[in-house]
Image (cartoon, rainbow, N blue to C red):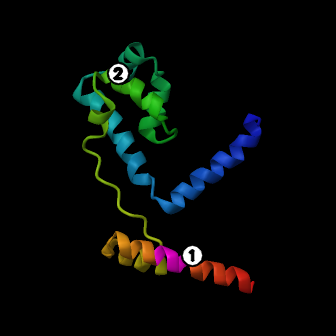
Amino acid sequence: MSTKERAPAASAAREEADVLYDTEPVLAYIRSRIAELCEKKHISKYRLNKRCGVSPKNVMRYIEGCRVPTIETIAKLCAGFGITLSEFFEDMPAPERPSFNDPRDSLLEIWDKLDQNGQSSLLSFGKYLADSEEKQS
C-alpha cells in the first residue's frame, strides 16, 4: 500500500479517535510541557536540537500546536531534557471517559456497576438482540 493510499485511512483513524476521545487536552499538555521544560531547564530550542536532534523549527511548531510530535519524537525530546517519558507525562491529568451524549452513556454506567457475571450476561443479551435485529433486516 502506498503512502497516498494510507493517508486517507490515517486521517479517518485520527477523526474517529477525536470523536471517541477528546485529544485536545493531551495535545495542549504536550505543548505546554515542552515549553515548560525548556524554561525550567534553561534549554533553548537550539540547544535542545544539539542534545536530541529535533530541529528548533519543529520544537516551535510543537509548542505552537502547528504540528503534533510522535511518541518517538517526544522520547527524543525527553532525552534532550534528561528525563524519561514517564517523567514527561507524570503530571498529565487522567483522561475522562468519552461522553457520547446519548444512551450509550447510560449503558456504560450500568456496565460499570455489574460484576463479571452480570457483565457477561449483559453482553450475551446484547449479542442476542443484535442477532435478532440482523435477522429481521
Of residues 96 and 131, the one nearer the viewer is 131
Q: Identify the image quadrant of residue 131.
A: bottom right
Side of 20 where 6 appears, left or right = right
Q: Position of residue 98 (x, y in %)?
A: 43, 65
Question: Magenta stretch containing residue 63, yes or no?
Answer: no
Q: Residues within 10 Å of mark 1 (few under 14, many from 20)?
A: few
Q: Return the disc, 2 or 1, that comes first in the chain's sequence.
A: 2
- Decide: marks 2, 1 in contact (CB < 8 A)? no
Which is the main secondary structure of the residues drawn in magenta? helix
**Residue numbers of the magenta segment:** 122-126
Q: Residue furthest top?
A: 50
Q: Which quadrant, please, contains the N terminus?
A: top right
Residue 127 locus on image (x, y percent): 57, 75
Q: Is residue 89 visible?
A: yes
Tag in front: 2 or 1: 1
Label 1 amino acid? Lys
Which residue type does callout 2 highlight? Answer: Ala
Q: Is residue 27 left or right of residue 12?
A: left
Query: What residue is rendered at 34% in x and 71% in y?
Result: 112
Q: Which residue is mark 2?
A: 79
Disc 1 marks which residue? 127
Q: Position of residue 121 (x, y in %)?
A: 44, 77
What crowding class fits label 2: few (fewer than 14 Cα within 10 Å), some (14-19), or many (20 or more)?
some
Which quarter of the image is occupied by the C terminus? bottom right
Q: Quadrant of residue 86?
A: top left
- Say which residue appears at 53% left-offset and 62% top-offset: 19
Q: Is residue 116 above or below residue 21?
A: below
Quadrant housing residue 108:
bottom left
Q: CA distance from mark 2 to mark 1?
A: 48 Å
Residue 45 horizontal/vertical position (percent) = 38, 23
